[in-house]
Amino acid sequence: MTQHFWLRYLWSFLPPSWRQGRVYRETMAMLEQHQNWSKDRLDSFQINATSRILEHAYQTTSGYRRRFDEWGVKPSDFKTPEDIRKFPTIAKEDLRDGLEEFSSDAVAKSRRVYVTTGGSTGIPFGLYWVKGYNIPKERAFIDAQRKRIGFNPGDKVAVFRGGFVGTAEKNGLWRYDPAHNELHFSSYHLKEPFLEMFLEQLTKFAPDFLYGYPSAFVLLAGYVKEKGGWPGKPLKGVMAGSENIYPGQRELIQNVFGCRAFTWYGHSEAAVLATECEHSSDYHVIAEYGLAEVLDREGRPVTQEGEAGEIVGTGFYGWATPFIRYKTRDLAVLGPGRCERCNRNYPLWRRVQGRLQEFIVTGSGRPISMVAINMHTPVFDNVRQFQFYQEKPGEVVLRLVKKPAYGPQDDANILRGIGEKLGPDTKLVLAAVDAVESAPSGKNRFLIQKLSLDRYLGDQQSFKELLADQIEPPSGSNQK
């Protein structure tokens, strides 16, 4: 084993909160103190936090300063949560094409961590986090939400979340992380005989929680059901995110694993976080994380329960790359004013849409979730947009809208990085295009799938809902 592994192993003997550092502990303590805050106190917190990030963005980034000046607004114009609508929105393309001007010159380059994201729309771009700050901050927010469903830092967690673990031919399809007591599995091999191997390892590991993609857990649950049921110790919960989770899927997961399935909404841009509580399946929009809006096609706030709109977020902790009124291109359906069951004063969303569960089918019939393929990687740095197209198993066309700097090395990097995830039974073909195909509603489509998924995903009703539960997305206009 490597020296790095042994260092992490020794580190694992420290108390969980101390492993994560001061930022983690302070954030957890803050969230614990806010549990029973009134709406007025949370509003006050949001006003102060929004004012700080607006001032920071205006003073330390040329991009936001220019945009605010063009709109004739100053950070001092923000006094109430509603005042955020005085400020311009920002799109993924703005950040993709102008990362440096929208990143803070107050954060030294030595303190920056470059993070890439493609999201659900196929528009990749990079952003900066602050070294030693954003990662523990993010983990604290996630762990605080997990605690509501019985999670304790240090609990055993089995992870099916898309991170590349290895290959069947080389270094195995699971990897233990002793620092977090997590066993990570490849979510690219959810098919026999690999599922049999995974189930054996899961039984030995005896996790308290499963954590990963709903699509991965549906496939795993289907296999477990065929084998007669969950053979391991009782689970405390299944934490399923990064994709929509539909009622049929939730029911299957809960019945097979004998515990509740919980989900959340978030993204690498760290502008919005929304999670279920211990009692409700509505999304509770975490007020301490960012200021979230739901806007209609004309950019007006959605106000009626059951009405849908685009999620627009202002993150409170993006000191390296601020996200001010960031248009996520994801959609939310408004819920009631507050949760009467947990009594927290967070806004509620009935559901989130936009992260459709789509699959590529390999030559051997393995379904691979597109959320897993859409890996956070710099191989797409010189790509403006990408889209997968498939019309026969084992062959996938990757359409690329290239930046001027794109060269032969980018071809090699993409073929290696994506090809490694697809596996040797699937051919990847790169095709340069001027634009990618959009859905009839105008939303970017991450995958054009011509195959009938029922043949490969089985007859589970949950997968038949993938294309049935649609909301028309808002337009891309940015009206003042």
Image (tube, rainbow, N blue to C red):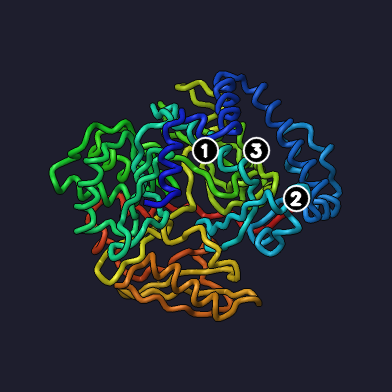
x, y percentage for residue 377? 52, 61
How many badges with numbers are in the image? 3
Q: Between marks 3 and 1, how big is the CA–CA gap?
A: 19 Å
Q: Residues within 10 Å of mark 3 (few under 14, many from 20)?
A: many
Viewer-proximal residue, 106 or 343? 106
Residue 290 shown left or right of residue 259 in the figure: right
Q: Could you say whether the residue bearing mark 3 is in a helix, strand or loop?
A: strand
Q: Label 3: which residue?
A: 291
Q: Residue 139 has which mark?
A: 1
| Vertical position of residue 367 compared to residue 80: above or below | below
Residue 413 shown left or right of residue 234 in the figure: right
Query: Is residue 475 visible to us here?
Result: yes
Q: Residues within 10 Å of mark 2 (few under 14, many from 20)?
A: many
* Residue at 32 percent of width and 31 percent of height: 236
Q: Could you say whether the residue bearing mark 2 is in a helix, strand or loop?
A: loop
| Vertical position of residue 318 compared to residue 233: above or below | below
Viewer-proximal residue, 355 or 191? 191
x, y percentage for residue 194? 23, 57
Q: Between marks 1 and 2, how big is the CA–CA gap?
A: 23 Å
x, y percentage for residue 218? 29, 48
* Residue at 32 percent of width and 69 percent of height: 451
